[in-house]
Image (cartoon, helix red, strand yellow):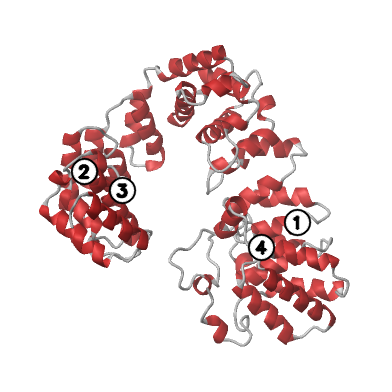
């Protein structure tokens, strides 16, 4: 990142729009970001095979890793900042800026801030001016993030508009959230900002938000858990801080709160990167109350999806011995299962499923697909008919492969062989990740390949194209099938492909898989 840029400009910010100006100009009339593009995107991601979603790199480091702190870089930053605070100069600013462009900010910011707090030879006034300059004038994200973090050392509202504006972009929200907490109305501003972001920024804000008013508690249950990354990150926080167990005990639950409670419960049941249903102390009571309200309020397939999630959770044998010895009684589990089944057995669901999957608007289709799978409604012929009109609809391939019927899979494989551009897909192994509209056909193929291990001898041409694809995942999925199939079900082309591709495979882990397959199947 920025490797070539460092050699181009003596002052890297010269002649470039500040990111603060760019973010401010990109806000709509409601103060929400219109798109996530930043002026430094091309420079920052130069040479990188994958671009993270805004704030994703910092979010992943913060939630899933313990970043290695670069002590040498942190010490250098502290020394330069101390020098700049006493004798401000453009040359020192340049050294700071270039160092920040090369180093990961999140991995060392705590150490830098802590060192600055302890360091005696720092002029606070000049340090504040430098922090404000980095945040407001910086043309590259890491220096801007660092400027925001430095502003957090100062308890003043003078920079509040600046950090609130930058915080509306998910790339900067984490740093703004920390700085906002030092303002005189920190929690109020966190809440205001949380309503303006939807990605990693919202996750950071909700985790820091104190539920000190009823308005905040209500918002947590209605909207707080929703984000563009994973609802599972915030479901537990919102259930606890929003006091879901109290809200759901209402005699006549508000429909909006019913939907919010359903979204939270589905995310808790799904589990994932944060606390789940087994961590939630009020789970038996809340699910019981939700089902009580469901007998009156469960009207849509979206509502039904929560009931299906609950039914799966309650009927799955795994984990119930621990639950029965902890929060749940055996009788309560069975009682709730009966309510789920009573709702699921209502006759009108099948008609709603067919309406959803046939509708031109696809927004409700996923709920229709899910309900059909769980209730045993056979959509295969209808979806295959739709595929003939839209042969590059990857979602249809995904759904159609959710079958155990080999005859149907053979029909689908023949269709794919005739309608997917297999020659273009089989362009030779590269290290493509498979992202982007231009690789849509590769995604269609992927959804077939990932299930072919269950259907011995089906789709030879598809597997051959997958083995020769530029997309890494296509090759992995094709190998999954061949590892499961006996060699007697392979055609000669597949044998040739495997031996040839072993020699030229660029990905080390895939090359190892090719070698292991050749050895296991005695192809040498």
Viewer-nearest residue: 138 or 357 = 138
- Disc 4 to disc 2, C-alpha distance: 54 Å
Please tell me which of labels 3 and 2 falls first in the chain: 3
Marks 1 and 2 close (CB-CB < 8 Å): no
Marks 1 and 3 close (CB-CB < 8 Å): no
The image quadrant that residue 78 belongs to is: bottom right
Residue beneath the point at 22% across and 46% down = 389
Nearest to viewer (mark 1 / mark 2): 2
Marks 4 and 1 close (CB-CB < 8 Å): no
Label 2 element class: loop
Viewer-nearest residue: 39 or 287 = 287
Residue beneath the point at 49% across and 72% down = 42
Q: Which residue is mark 3?
A: 394
Marks 3 and 2 close (CB-CB < 8 Å): no
Q: Which residue is mark 2?
A: 485
Image coordinates for residue 63, horizontal then vertical, percent:
60, 50
Residue 222 appears left or right of 45: right
Q: Which residue is mark 4?
A: 166
Label 3 element class: helix
Nearest to viewer (mark 3 / mark 2): 2
The image quadrant that residue 94 belongs to is: bottom right
Please tell me which of labels 4 and 3 falls first in the chain: 4
- Disc 4 to disc 3, C-alpha distance: 37 Å
314 up-or-down from 164: above or below: above
Please tell me which of labels 4 and 2 falls first in the chain: 4
Please tell me which of labels 1 and 2 falls first in the chain: 1
- Disc 4 to disc 1, C-alpha distance: 11 Å
Q: Residue furthest right?
A: 120
Residue 375 appears left or right of 479: right
Marks 4 and 2 close (CB-CB < 8 Å): no
Residue beneath the point at 18% across and 58% down = 524
391 up-or-down from 277: above or below: below
């Amino acid at each position: 990142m920025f490797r070539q840029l460092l050699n181009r400009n003596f002052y890297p910010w010269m002649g470039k729009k500040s990111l603060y100006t760019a973010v401010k100009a990109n806000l709509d009339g409601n103060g929400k970001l219109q798109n996530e593009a930043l002026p430094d995107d091309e420079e920052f991601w130069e040479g990188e095979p994958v671009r993270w979603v805004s704030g994703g790199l910092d979010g992943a480091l913060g939630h899933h890793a313990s970043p290695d702190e670069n002590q040498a870089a942190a010490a250098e930053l502290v020394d330069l900042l101390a020098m700049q605070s006493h004798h401000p100069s453009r040359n020192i600013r340049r050294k700071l800026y270039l160092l920040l462009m090369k180093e990961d900010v999140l991995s060392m910011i705590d150490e830098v801030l802590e060192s600055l707090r302890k360091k005696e030879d720092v002029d606070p006034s000049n340090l504040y001016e430098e922090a404000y300059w980095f945040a407001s004038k910086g043309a590259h994200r890491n220096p801007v993030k660092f400027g925001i973090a430095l502003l957090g050392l100062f308890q003043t509202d003078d920079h509040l508009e600046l950090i609130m504006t930058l915080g509306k972009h998910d790339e900067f929200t984490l740093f703004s959230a920390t700085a906002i907490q030092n303002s005189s109305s920190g929690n109020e501003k966190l809440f205001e900002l949380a309503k303006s972001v939807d990605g990693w920024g919202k996750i950071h804000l909700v985790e820091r938000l104190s539920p000190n008013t009823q308005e905040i508690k209500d918002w947590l249950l209605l909207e707080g858990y929703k984000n563009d990354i994973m609802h599972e990150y915030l479901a537990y926080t919102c259930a606890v801080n929003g006091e879901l167990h109290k809200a759901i005990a209402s005699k006549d639950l508000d429909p909006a709160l019913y939907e919010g409670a359903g979204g939270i419960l589905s995310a808790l049941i799904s589990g994932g990167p944060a606390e789940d249903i087994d961590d939630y102390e009020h789970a038996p009571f809340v699910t019981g109350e939700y089902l009580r309200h469901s007998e009156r309020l469960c009207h849509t397939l979206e509502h039904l999806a929560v009931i299906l999630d609950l039914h799966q959770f309650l009927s799955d044998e795994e984990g119930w011995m621990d639950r029965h010895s902890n929060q749940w009684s055996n009788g309560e589990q069975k009682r709730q299962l009966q309510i789920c089944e009573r709702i699921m057995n209502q006759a009108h669901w099948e008609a709603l499923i067919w309406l959803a999957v046939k509708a031109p608007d696809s927004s409700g289709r996923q709920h229709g697909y899910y309900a059909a799978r769980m209730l045993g409604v056979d959509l295969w012929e209808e979806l295959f008919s739709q595929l003939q009109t839209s042969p590059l609809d990857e979602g249809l391939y995904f759904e159609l492969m959710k079958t155990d019927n080999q005859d149907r899979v053979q029909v689908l494989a023949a269709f794919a062989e005739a309608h997917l551009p297999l020659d273009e897909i089989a362009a030779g192994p590269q290290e493509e990740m498979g992202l982007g509209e231009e690789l849509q056909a590769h995604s269609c193929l992927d959804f077939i390949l990932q299930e072919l291990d269950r259907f011995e001898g089906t789709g030879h041409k598809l597997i051959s194209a997958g083995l020769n694809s530029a997309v890494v995942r296509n090759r992995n999925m094709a190998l999954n099938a061949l590892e499961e199939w006996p060699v007697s079900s392979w055609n000669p082309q597949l044998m040739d492909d495997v031996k040839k591709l072993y020699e030229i495979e660029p990905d080390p882990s895939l090359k190892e898989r090719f070698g292991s397959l050749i050895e296991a199947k005695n192809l040498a």
